[in-house]
Amino acid sequence: MLISERSKESDAMKRELSIALEKIEGHKLELRDLSDKFTLKMNEIGEIDEKIRMLISVSQEKERKHKRQIQSLTILVQCLYTSIADFECRVMEDITKNNMRLDNLSSQLRALIRKAKVIKGTELMYKQRLERRSSDLQKAEAEV
């Protein structure tokens, strides 16, 4: 009986071992499947990471490009501002010169107007003398 008991125990252990081996094989398959899924997910994460790096690189390049454009525009605006300031200065100088010339011409014109008045007065006087002499001459001719 001892042998048959041991044989039964041995058969029971074999069954348990067989079941345990089947479970182990199932776990191995499940572990392989999980490992494959893990590898796929890691690959997906790597692809996503690469896309993120590319997007960051493109974004940084656009940012650098915009920064260069802003710097160029800033320099252009500064140059325009300087040009406008220089132009304003030249215009003010020209206006000042023209005002001085106008003042000078105005002064000369006043002097010419005074001279013209004097000449008109002299002309009127000479005209009156001429008319008087002409009249005197006509009277003298009429008497003769």
Image: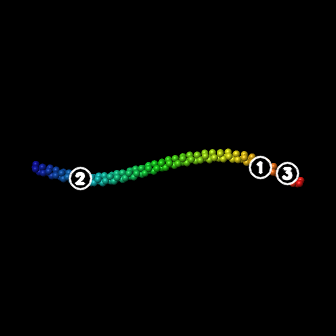
Any part of residue 30 in sight: no
Tell me the distance, in whole angstroms, between the alpha carbons under discs 1 and 2.
Answer: 136 Å
Q: Residues within 10 Å of mark 2 (few under 14, many from 20)?
A: few
Cα distance, mark 3 to mark 2?
155 Å
Residue 28, numbered circle = 2
Q: Taking 85 as reference, is 19 left or right?
A: left
Number of numbered callouts drawn: 3
Q: Pick the residue in front: 86 or 22.
A: 86
**In the image, is 96 to the left or to the right of 130?**
left
What residue appears at the point 59 percent right and 47 percent down from the top-left corner? 94
Which of label 3 and label 2 is nearer to you? 3
Residue that badge 3 annotates: 136
Please give left or right for residue 10 compared with residue 67 in the image.
Answer: left
Q: Classify the position of the C terminus by image quarter.
A: bottom right
**Which element carries disc 2, helix, strand or loop?**
helix
Residue type at mark 1 is: Glu
Q: Amino acid at mark 2?
A: Lys
Question: How many neighbours does mark 1 have within 10 angstroms: few (below 14), some (14-19), or many (20 or more)?
Answer: few
Nearer to the camera, 94 or 133: 133
Question: Of helix, strand and loop, which one carries label 1?
Answer: helix
Front in this rendered view, residue 52 or 1 = 52
Residue 123's disc number: 1
